[in-house]
Amino acid sequence: MKDITRRQFIIVTSLAAGFALAVQPIVAAVIKTSTRGLEAGEVKIPVADGEIPAYRAMPAKGKNFPVILVVQEIFGVHEHIRDICRRLAKLGYLAIAPELYARQGDVSQVTDIQEIISTVVSKVPDAQVMSDLDATVKWASASSKGNTNKLGITGFCWGGRIVWLYAAHNPKVKAGVAWYGRLVSEKTDLTPKHPIDIAKSLKVPVLGLYGAQDDGIPNDTVFQMRRLLRQGKSNSKIILYPNTPHGFNADYRPSYRQKEATDGWKRLRNWFKRNGVG
């Protein structure tokens, strides 16, 4: 892994409120999970060159909670990702979503998705992401009430791809759930590997949740990933929902599909329990 130098300047020092501008207006189906019975809010994670903000939610009472890393969509740690953390906390987890674009910029106020991709997302190195997630795991164990011997990870869209990569990177991860993360893409200095490249060597069980009508993730790449996973020993699997678009769990967007999202959430819960996370 390349070193993260102290010359890099952290731009984002706190999380923006609400939903990212690029996804508004918000649809009526949006889910709002209460903080009642939870300890939830922004925290700071010490990283290699300073600190990054994160959203952490966990039960208000108790300790030694299983830890789930929640990896953001391309829109950063906006309200949907924070709500995912609260939903997991209601299940007894310490869920934490670090802002992984902190050095590259604040995407919450950008209205155009392509601009988000070109000016911020495309400049985020995988090595930086792996390092920041490692730091988040360390913080959850040392500074919160997390039991990182029961460590899981889930992520959405951009974060779905990261789930596969982090599961290959950190052997302490017990299980992962990747929601519609890209599997195949161009290799660059910042993104030298993609999920397809680690499929056969993967040791951590990852559940992939994908839509058959996802315009950005062709079905043939999903089938290719399945074949390669079967050649390995991770016991990972991919569910491909028919007639389902990208972002089907994003209840704040028109892409939301309640039936598939509900089924996917049930599978997530069972997957983590079955594989020692919780």
Image (tube, helix red, strand yellow):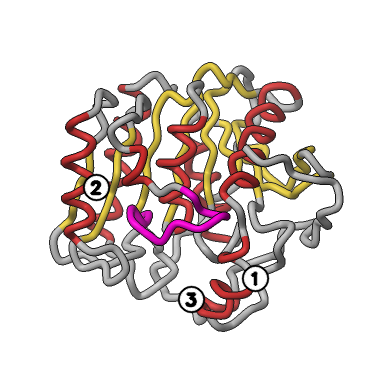
Which amino acid does the dot numbered 1 rest on? Ser
Q: Are marks 2 and 3 in contact (CB under 8 Å)?
A: no
Whether residue 122 is situated above or below residue 110 in the rendered picture: above
The x, y position of residue 180, in whole percent, is 34, 55
Q: Is residue 184 magenta?
A: yes
Residue situated in front as seen by the camera: 91 or 141: 141
The x, y position of residue 179, in whole percent, is 36, 51
Is 177 on the left or on the right of 88, as rendered? left
Q: Which residues are magenta?
A: 180-192
Query: Circle 2 — which element?
Result: helix
Q: Are marks 2 and 1 in contact (CB under 8 Å)?
A: no
Residue situated in front as seen by the camera: 268 or 120: 120
Which residue does the numbered mark 3 point to in the structure image?
26
Judged by its main secondary structure, the magenta piece is loop
Which residue does the numbered mark 2 point to in the structure image?
263
Whether residue 98 is situated above or below residue 15 in the rendered picture: above
Which amino acid does the dot numbered 2 rest on? Asp
Residue 5 in view (yes/no):
yes
Q: Residue furthest left?
A: 242
Going from N to C along the chain, the mark reached first, 1 or 3, is 3
Residue visible at 36% across and 57% down in the picture = 182
Indicate which label's residue lies in the foreground, 1 or 3. 1
The x, y position of residue 126, in whole percent, is 56, 48
Which residue does the numbered mark 1 point to in the structure image?
108
Is 9 on the left or on the right of 85, as rendered? right
The x, y position of residue 264, in whole percent, is 28, 47
Which amino acid does the dot numbered 3 rest on? Ile
Q: Which mark is residue 29?
A: none
Whether residue 34 is situated above or below residue 110 in the rendered picture: above
Going from N to C along the chain, the mark reached first, 2 or 1, is 1
Residue visible at 82% across and 44% down in the picture = 49
Label 2 to label 1: alpha-carbon separation: 29 Å
